Image (cartoon, rainbow, N blue to C red):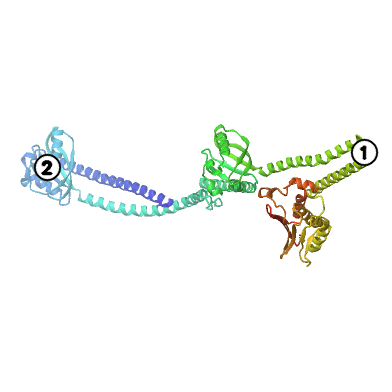
């Protein structure tokens, strides 16, 4: 029974039924009492009339005359009159022969008058002879204020019982019709009242199910109308607030998902509640696997876990640097701050991790670069200073010594000039200060032109060079940059290849790109040096590089020039067997 109108109607039906039953009993009892009072009064009046006609002397002298008089006064279906003496003997009776009647001294109404000395008495009892209830009233017969007998009047209550039964039937029908009509009206009224209430309940239920677009549509009046307006206002407010919450959540989700820094929310229990994609990459585990786990299990970093536990325990912000070794070795700038609720209780800590591994690596490279530049500049400057001081001390008077020293000073000056030029050139490339103007070029032609300029160095070391076939291969490139790329790679190959070695230049023409391979049979590069060969001033064989006049910036310049063409450079080398550089360049520049 879930319908509110049905509950109200049923309760109203039960209440109305009880009220109507109570009213029926009250009316029936009132009607019965009215009938009884009327009958009682009538019987007492009959008894009084009879007592007026009875001669007190005839009670003991002329019973036959008294009997005839009583019989003549009352016919059948009239109240029954019985005259009784003080001893209970029946002297006369309107319906029966007194001689055949038993003594009435034990009758209740008789005893009430004789023993109680009452002015009148009554009794209602069931008649075994007649089979229905009778009403008996009695009044005393007095002689000089002395009771000498009793006049009893009896009347059957059968008619009253029949009347009461008819009354009950009438009342039952009337009450039934009233109950039916009242129930029908109650149902209509309850439906009219409960329909908006049920609508309000339904809207409230939908609001609990997060359907904030639902509204109360029923037309009502009075307090229900005020309630419906309040519910609709509440629904609008909730809808507006939820839209704001969703919008803020989307903003927060967008920020978290696009942050470069890793963010992780730790509950007071030490379990992970939230991680963003950047944190997944840093830790090397997906969010589904991280959520709900202890931070020591997920991060696998004892140092980080110590900082988180400390922040939880001391409710303080912490900034420190942490090393992680899983899934790869990383240096993390760690910010940990407690998240405190409105009541001041801690809700957890927020951990923000910045991967500064590359920054630290670049700082190290920068430091090494400064040291290398200082070292590279120091050598020629020291030579220049030393030889010039020697000349000033008197050596310039010796022509041969002067010529030798000036030659060395010139060579060191040239070396210093090349070094400074390469540094400035590399700086301009890195800062994109040199304009890039690609044009259609024949790569094969550029390779041949570049090799021609290096022919003298090749001949000095008796190196054999193999070139690709002279079939034109056209790409979009800048001639000077492409030429410098090939030039630096061939120069490197010449430097690190022993005499009578070989160099091979090969070109792969693919659909959208080309691959230029420069392979030598030189000393090769150790595996541990391969990741660093494109760093500035990094040399595999420092002594040979300096002796050859190299600045240590050639491969760094090559890498930047290749990247300016939206290309890539790869290296494959084995120590003692040679090195192969592969330049990958797109055919079209967009």
Q: Position of residue 486 (x, y in %)?
A: 78, 57
Most foreground residue, 24 or 280: 280
Q: Residue 470: x and y, percent?
A: 79, 66
With respect to residue 458, does 128 lie above or below? Answer: above
Q: Label 2 vs label 1: CA separation?
A: 188 Å
Disc 2 element = strand
Residue lying at 61% horizontally and 34% vertically, measured from the top left:
317
Circle 1 sits in a helix, a strand or a loop, which is it? Answer: helix
Image quarter of the C terminus: bottom right
Return the x and y of residue 134 as percentages of the image width and height. Answer: 17, 46
Query: Within 10 angstroms of label 2, few (less than 14), some, or many (20 or more) residues?
Result: many
Residue 357 in sight from this viewpoint: yes
Q: Which mark is residue 83?
A: 2
Q: Is residue 19 left or right of residue 354?
A: left
Image-based side of 399 in relation to 255, left or right: right
Judging depth in this view, the residue of 493 and 487 nearest the camera is: 493
| Earlier sequence position, callout 2 versus callout 1 | 2
Q: Judge by depth and name the residue closer to the eye, 322 or 55.
A: 322
Answer left or right for 369 relative to 207.
right
| Residue bearing the label numbered 1 | 396
Q: On residue 493, which mark appears?
A: none
The residue under the point 75% across, 51% down is 555
Residue 50, relative to residue 192: is it above or below? Answer: above
Q: Position of residue 482 (x, y in %)?
A: 79, 57
């Amino acid at each position: 029974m879930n319908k509110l109108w049905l509950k109200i109607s049923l309760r109203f039906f039960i209440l109305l039924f009880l009220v109507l039953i109570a009213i029926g009993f009250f009316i029936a009892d009132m009607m019965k009492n009215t009938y009884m009072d009327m009958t009682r009064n009538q019987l007492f009046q009959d008894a009084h009339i009879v007592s007026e006609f009875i001669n007190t002397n005839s009670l003991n002298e002329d019973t036959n005359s008294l009997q005839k008089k009583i019989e003549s006064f009352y016919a059948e279906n009239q109240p029954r009159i019985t005259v009784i003496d003080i001893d209970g003997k029946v002297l006369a009776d309107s319906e029966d022969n007194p001689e055949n009647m038993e003594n009435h001294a034990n009758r209740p109404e008789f005893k009430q008058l004789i023993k109680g000395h009452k002015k009148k008495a009554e009794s209602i009892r069931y008649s075994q002879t007649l089979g229905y209830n009778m009403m008996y009233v009695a009044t005393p017969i007095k002689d000089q204020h002395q009771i000498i007998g009793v006049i009893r009047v009896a009347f059957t209550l059968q008619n009253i019982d029949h009347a009461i039964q008819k009354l009950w039937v009438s009342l039952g029908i009337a009450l039934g019709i009233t109950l039916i009509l009242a129930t029908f009206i109650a149902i209509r009224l309850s439906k009219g009242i409960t329909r908006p209430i049920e609508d309000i309940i339904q809207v409230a239920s939908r609001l609990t199910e997060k359907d904030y677009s639902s509204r109360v549509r029923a037309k009502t009046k009075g307090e229900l109308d005020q309630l419906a307006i309040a519910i609709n206002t509440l629904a609008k407010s909730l809808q507006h607030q939820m839209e704001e919450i969703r919008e803020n959540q989307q903003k927060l989700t967008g920020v978290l998902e696009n942050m470069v820094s890793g963010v992780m929310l730790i509950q007071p229990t030490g379990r992970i509640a939230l991680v963003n994609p950047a944190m997944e990459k840093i830790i090397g585990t997906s969010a589904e696997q991280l959520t709900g786990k202890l931070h020591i299990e997920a991060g696998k970093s004892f140092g980080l876990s110590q900082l988180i536990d400390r922040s939880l325990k001391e409710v303080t912000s912490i900034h420190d640097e942490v090393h992680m070794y899983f899934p790869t070795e990383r240096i993390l700038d760690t910010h940990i701050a407690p998240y405190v609720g409105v009541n001041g209780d801690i809700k957890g800590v927020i951990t923000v991790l910045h991967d500064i591994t590359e920054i630290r690596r670049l700082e190290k490279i920068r430091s090494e670069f400064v040291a290398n530049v200082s070292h590279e500049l120091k050598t020629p400057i020291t030579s220049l200073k030393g030889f010039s001081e020697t000349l000033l001390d008197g050596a310039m008077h010796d022509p041969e010594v002067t010529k030798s020293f000036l030659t060395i000073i010139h060579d060191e000056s040239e070396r210093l000039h090349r070094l400074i030029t390469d540094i400035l050139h590399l700086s301009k490339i890195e800062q994109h200060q040199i304009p890039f103007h690609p044009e259609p070029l024949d790569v094969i032609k550029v390779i041949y032109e570049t090799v021609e300029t290096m022919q003298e160095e090749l001949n000095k070391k008796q190196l054999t060079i193999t070139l690709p076939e002279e079939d034109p291969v056209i790409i979009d490139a800048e001639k000077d940059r492409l030429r410098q790329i090939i030039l630096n790679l061939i120069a490197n190959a010449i430097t690190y290849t022993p005499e009578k070695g070989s160099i091979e230049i090969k070109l792969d023409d693919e659909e959208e790109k080309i691959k230029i391979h420069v392979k030598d049979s030189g000393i090769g590069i150790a595996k541990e040096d391969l990741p660093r060969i494109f760093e500035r001033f990094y040399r595999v064989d420092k002594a040979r590089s300096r002796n050859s006049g190299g600045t240590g910036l050639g491969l760094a310049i090559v890498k930047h020039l290749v990247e300016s063409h939206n290309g890539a450079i790869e290296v494959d080398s084995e120590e003692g067997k040679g090195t192969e550089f592969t330049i990958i360049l797109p055919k079209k520049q967009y």
